[in-house]
């Protein structure tokens, strides 16, 4: 069991790095466009350059989904409390909502993508922190 708890912690830390990469990629996309000169040639080039970052954001989003699925499996394997397993499942549901929000053509609804991202980061951080299987706190929990 202990190895699965440690694996859950490691995958949770990896998930947090992936979340930060998501934030970086979308910020790079936005600032590539916003900081361009106001002429047709530069705007076209900015959008073309921003496509790279937007593509990385999308690809990393699918990797996040795979990581959350792995966390869900590890939550069962580690025999974490039911609450942890349910919240890890909620993390996956929120990710599915994230994909739905990204594809909705209504800007006021699609903007929920950003708010949902904050919830994902918060819940992912909470799950990783409260189930951390390394260090002094982990030793106290075992005894």
Image: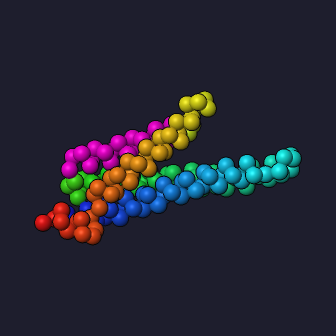
The residue range painted magenta reads 81-100
Residue 67, image quadrant: bottom left
Between residues 128 and 14, which one lies in front from this camera angle?
A: 128
Residue 138, image quadrant: bottom left
Q: Is residue 110 left or right of residue 7?
A: right
Q: Residue 12: x, y in percent?
A: 37, 59
Q: Is residue 36 left or right of residue 98?
A: right
- Residue at 23% x, 57% y is 77
Q: Residue 81: x, y in percent?
A: 20, 50
Q: Is residue 4 visible?
A: no
**Is 119 included in the stretch rendered in magenta?**
no
The rendered magenta stretch, by its main secondary structure, is classed as helix
Q: Residue 46: x, y in percent?
A: 76, 52
Q: Is residue 86 visible?
A: yes
Please tell me how many numbered marks the rendered image carries. 0
Q: Residue 54: x, y in percent?
A: 63, 51
């Amino acid at each position: 069991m202990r190895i699965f708890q440690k694996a859950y912690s490691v995958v949770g830390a990896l998930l947090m790095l992936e979340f930060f990469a998501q934030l970086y990629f979308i910020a790079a996309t936005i600032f590539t466009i916003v900081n361009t000169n106001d002429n047709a040639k530069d705007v076209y080039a900015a959008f073309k350059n921003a496509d790279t970052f937007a593509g990385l954001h999308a690809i990393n989003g699918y990797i996040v989904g795979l990581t959350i699925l792995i966390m869900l499996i590890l939550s069962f394997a580690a025999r974490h409390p039911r609450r942890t397993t349910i919240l890890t499942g909620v993390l996956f549901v929120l990710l599915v909502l994230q994909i739905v929000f990204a594809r909705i053509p209504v800007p006021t609804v699609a903007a929920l993508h950003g708010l949902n991202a904050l919830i994902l980061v918060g819940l992912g951080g909470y799950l990783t922190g409260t189930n951390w299987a390394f260090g002094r706190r982990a030793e106290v929990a075992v005894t």
